[in-house]
Amino acid sequence: QVQLVESGGGLVQAGASLRLSCAVSGRTFSGYYISWFRQAPGKDRELVAGIRWGGSTTYYLDSVKGRFTISRDSAKNTVYLQMNRLKPDDTAVYYCAARTLATEKYDYWGQGTQVTVSS
């Protein structure tokens, strides 16, 4: 059974940092792309960052470039999202998700972790 389990969310003040973790299990993710999405109340879900499991190719939403870093620890089967200089606009539920490289459709999703940034 494939599982993606997020952790690391919380309530912080603007300017602070958080590191989210996404522990993946249940299959090999070689050939997969792992991404972090977020959804704020009343807003559409947006793709924040992504990384190819077996490589170094990354993607970042323009508004987080230079502040967020996505990384992968294959030995721990975990993908991280380091978030620095957090802003109130970063407040959302953050989800990790996985898809194969052959499609844009994400097959696997985590349950989400809440990030709240106070001003």
Image (cartoon, grey):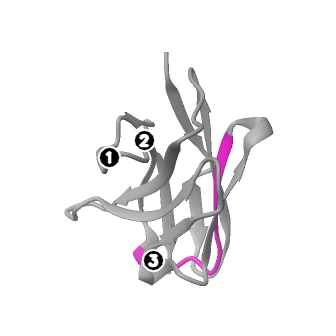
* Residue type indicated by callout 1: Thr
Q: Give the residue displayed 50% in from the left and 73% down from the top.
A: 118
Nearest to the observer: residue 82 or residue 92: 82
Secondary structure under the numbered disc 2 in the rendered image: strand
The x, y position of residue 87, in whole percent, is 50, 79
The x, y position of residue 117, in whole percent, is 51, 70
Nearest to the observer: residue 4 or residue 54: 54
Residue linked to disc 3: 88
13 w.r.t. 24: above or below: below
Q: Give the residue displayed 53% in from the left and 41% down from the top.
A: 31
* Residue type indicated by callout 2: Thr
Mark 2 and mark 1 in contact (Cβ < 8 Å)? yes
Give the distance between the C-alpha atoms of the residues marked 1 and 2, in whole angstroms.
Answer: 6 Å
First in sequence: mark 3 or mark 2? 3
Residue linked to disc 2: 100
Residue linked to disc 1: 103
Give the distance between the C-alpha atoms of the residues marked 3 and 2, in whole angstroms.
Answer: 32 Å
What stretch of residues is rendered in magenta?
78-89
88 in magenta: yes
Give the distance between the C-alpha atoms of the residues marked 3 and 1, in whole angstroms.
Answer: 33 Å
The x, y position of residue 34, in whole percent, is 51, 48
